[in-house]
Amino acid sequence: MNKSKRDWEPRLVGFLCNWCSYAGADLAGTSRMQYPPNMRVIRVPCSSRVRPEFILRALQKGADGVLVAGCHPGDCHYTTGNYYTRRRFQVIKRLLTFLGVDPRRVMASWISAAEGGKYQQVVTEFVETIRELGPCDFRPTNGQIFVPAADERTDLGVVS
Amino acid sequence: MTTIQDELRETARTLLAEGQVDCVLGWAWEEELQRAVPCFVRAAEDAKRLIWDERCVVSLAPFLLHMKRQLSSVRTEPSRTAIVVKGCDARGVVRILRDQQLERDEVLIIGVVCQGVGDPDNRPAKCRECQYHVPPVYDLLLGEEPKETQTPSSPLLERVREIEGWDVADRASYWREHFSRCLRCYACRQVCPACNCVECIFDSERTRWTYKRTTAEENMIFHAIRAFHVAGRCVECGECERACPMGIPLMEINKKVASDIKELFSVPDAGVDLREEPPLVRYETGDLDHFV
Amino acid sequence: MKRVGVFVCHCGSNIAGTVDCAAVVAAARRIPAVAYAEDNKYTCSEVGQEQIRKAVQTHNLDRVVVAACSPRMHEATFRKTIASVGLNPYMLEIANLREQCSWVHSDRQAATAKAIDLVRLAVAKVLYNKPLFTSTLPVKKRAVVIGGGIAGIQAALDIAEAGHPVTLIERSQSIGGRMAQLDKTFPTLDCSSCILMPRMVDVGAHPMIDLMTYSEVEEVDGFIGNFRVKVRQRAKSVDHSKCTGCGECTEKCPTQVPAEFEAGLGERKAIYTDFPQAVPNKPVIDRDHCRYFLDGKCGICRKVCQADAIDYTQTDRQVEIEAGAIVVATGFDLFDPAKYGEYGGGRYPDVITGLQFERLISASGPTNGEIRRPSDGRVPETIAFIKCVGSRDEAHGVPYCSRVCCMYTAKQAMLVKEHAKDSKVYIFYIDVRAAGKGYEEFYQRAQTDAGATYVRGRVAKIFPRGEKLVLWAEDTLIGKQLELEVDLVVLATGIVAREGAVEFAQKMGISYDGHRFYSEAHPKLRPVDTNVDGIFLAGACQGPKDIPDTVAQASAAAVKVCSIFSKEELETNAMVATVDENICAGCFHCRAVCPSGAIDSKILHAWVAGQDVTRRVATVNSGVCQGCGSCAAACPSGAMNVGGFSNEQILGEVEAL
């Protein structure tokens, strides 16, 4: 485990809204701001386009952390999209935490088209956080189905 | 003394005889199964088959959906169905109406005052913490409204708080164990009044939302997404957990989401008001922002 | 089999300096769906584009990935490129190797690995791209301008001058609005009427302007290019086609009613025009007060009318106007100082508002321009002006600054000198805000030329003492309590949104802020647009504004309208939401989250077991949809989808992670 962890590089996915956060990430580029190369960006028209299904799938398909970024509240290109994002995201994050996903693996941020520096900072810090957390284990392990020991089952009072 | 059951039979008979409704959806006793089952009474003389007592556990609300979707083909005139509801079931009817699956005038809601169903010595969890002995929405009410009501404590919520207090790893293995047993039989979905999609994304042939294999991870996606799809709309009737053949404590998840939503957005319980707006399709500009 | 072409751009050394482009091409070739891959020095150059065109034809490609700079840069360029060789322009994806890879990383190996990943993601997405098509919508070349104040007047004239017909809708009897009530304007002391009236006359006479006064908008539906505006024309009870505007009826009418135009200081008749220079200068009968309508007696106006224009039988009329664009210029209300109990809450007649003061100094006002106290008609010797009444006061009013009060108070102080030159003027203020061309100089003149005494501090209490009013205040600059006896107090009441502003916004589908002012589409870059395409804002309905800013915004709105009208047809956005009607359950969560009102319901018929079964499903108006995808995320079943960012495309990308 320790060995593999040393070779392992965090893999992050960012769902960035086209109008603010993606433009902010572009600005980081035109400003030549350096950040770790662990982020894979999926462009979406608006942060409110992001279905929780996408976040879950991303975690399952190899992402160790997921970022959802949109315009600051009140600045949404479509006026209201990020307000829905904000509600949905809080609910899904708490739900995933409850189901055993470390809350630090899913994050949201408001990054405007002018905030190249903020994007750089968010990505850098996120990579560090995930590096400390280690790989996401929310992934099929060789397609194996987890089967608890028989005594554990009886403890849970499960009829099977 | 007339019982609620007598009142119910008389009400149903009158409604049918006067042509106010085409069907009364209630419970009847099925001797062979030794179970109260849904009963669609269409003739006044059959009203005597209806029962109302502690055996009437199953919520009838989802059957409204099934009727609308499957029986509509044999209907030519717009029809009106009377449905018998306990407090918890009434919230399911509100859900279906609020999700615009039926028009308000297609349903006549006969509410019954309920003090809990099932084995009196071992009531289902939802009955032990019931706040809706009187249905929050009804057209006709049978039974006496209890004089004083006290808000009972919620062992389910306490359980949610307990789980929240565990380490992330413990929660992960707890749910991994539960989800590894899920058969993806979708019984939870079928009995859910909030799961009223025409086609569930997990049945989609067109879009690969998730895989069909039943590993703990895939199953977790299913349960997380299902919980999210009913988030803010779940009426906490507990039917999913009751229907689950594998004994997965689904209401722990639903309660978690419901209590989060109440806390985050200061909304009332889902399914108690016909004018409710699902909290995830509305917003306040002043919603919490600190998580960002 | 889908055939993807991948084109990796070096961008000189911008990309190639950090990313091993040959390695990216080699990796792309290993992806099964990639039928062709190459790298170019500059893909966006004519040579590079020609390479793409050639490759599409030679290798029979049906979709293309360009790995180059940000899609925000050249997506449109490459869409045209592939369209020129017969591909649908939307069969393109861009992998952002420059702004989000080569420019932000220095480790060549890591940057190359990331670039390969980005190409893989783009290929995975493009495999699910579908041809998208724009459609065109005809444009109704008529504008509706709602509100006949200076904003509406300016917008209507500008649009009409550009040659497009305009319907100007005004609620009251005459156009003119707030500006008509003002005496002079800062910072030039132009007479308000003298600059406004010619514009009003122009509106009345303009062949392209259809003026509908005494009318209200009841309903708006449709979308850009094709709005339908339902207007209720209230019964005027006067046939304006016959009326000569001689004024005999008004003269003879026996009923006196408080005049709205005089802000409560004067009276009008039951058959009236708002003010003598009204446009149209033909009266209406106020049926709520007219004796004929109240008890059937009187009828004097009909007797005296030589033109036989009085018509008691008129009824309200509903008119539907088809318009391609709408300008909302519904103006503002003034803050009601009744909420200030400590200033008398409206009980002291000699505590008046700034607007009432305007009427007092107006030559056509109730006192013919003499400053006289409402209580006893005496000329006040001492006048106190109190600023920020309602504004910047969350306890009583609103937190924002109303922007005009500092300047109109300075103006009023100067006018006191003109009208009652021996009167002493005190001005109580929190701050003086005089940002605007010539404003600071004007404020200085109010102190030097007009001799107004500015006292920094809020007035705590006003109460009567004999015939005088006593003010208690603190001069915060010297830290002393003051008591001041004055004859007249003028409250500089702030600007608030119109009563009913929210209901009106909901009729239009436009959004509003926490203070009920209408929201612009973008605070900096789209200040006159609303969130609804084709509906524009002008004037104080969007927020407090002075006359120059209002006029500027009105002209800006007019240009926006004219740019819509410069086209015969509007091209719709191709990347819009679509509904899979077979799956849609009709829960309409999509409609709840749609910011542009693009989702409607429709009845779907299906034959099931020989029966016609109906079901309600969502339908998207592609002319209105902006493609944000909120609906697609709110739809539990995935029936709602978005072209260009479909569920399948995004899942494809996620799958390739």
Image (cartoon, coloured by chain):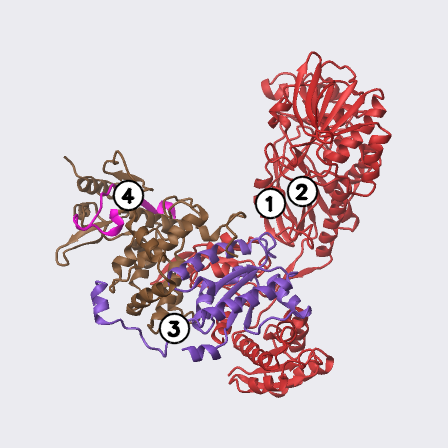
Residue C543 shows which numbered tag? 2
**How far is disc 3 from disc 1 in space, using C-alphas?**
44 Å
Q: Amino acid at mark 1?
A: Asp
Residue at numbered disc 4: B152
Q: Which secondary structure, mark 2? A: loop
Q: Please state the chain letter of the residue tagged with numbered disc 3 in the rendered image.
A: B
Question: Which chain is mark 4 on?
Answer: B
CB-based contact (under 8 Å), mark 3 and mark 1: no
Labels 2 and 3 positioned on one and the same chain: no
Determine the colour of chain C.
red
Q: Which residue is mark 3?
A: B211
Which element type, helix, strand or loop, lies under badge 3?
Answer: loop
Amino acid type for the residue under numbered disc 3: Tyr
- Classify 10 Å Cα crowding around label 3: few (below 14), some (14-19), many (20 and above): few
Q: Which residue is at a point 40% across and 63% down the rendered structure image?
A: B225
State the extent of the magenta-drawn residues as a range: B103-128
Chain bearing mark 1? C
10 Å crowding of disc 2: few (<14), some (14-19), many (20+): many
Q: Give C352 or C111, whichever is nearer the viewer.
A: C111
- Give the letter of the purple chain: A
Q: Do callouts 2 and 1 mark residues in contact (Cβ within 8 Å)?
A: yes
Same chain assignment for discs 3 and 1: no
Nearer to me, C518 or A148: A148
Check residue B120 for magenta coloring.
Answer: yes
Question: In terms of image quadrants, where is residue C235?
Answer: top right
How far, Cα to Cα, is label 1 from label 4? 41 Å
How far is mark 3 from mark 4, CA to CA? 41 Å
C167 to the left or right of A4: right
Distance from Cα at disc 2 to Cα at disc 4: 50 Å
Instruction: Identify the residue at the far top of this view.
Output: C466
Which residue is disc 1 drawn over? Answer: C513
Name the residue located 35 percent from the left edge and 68 percent from the top edge.
Answer: B219
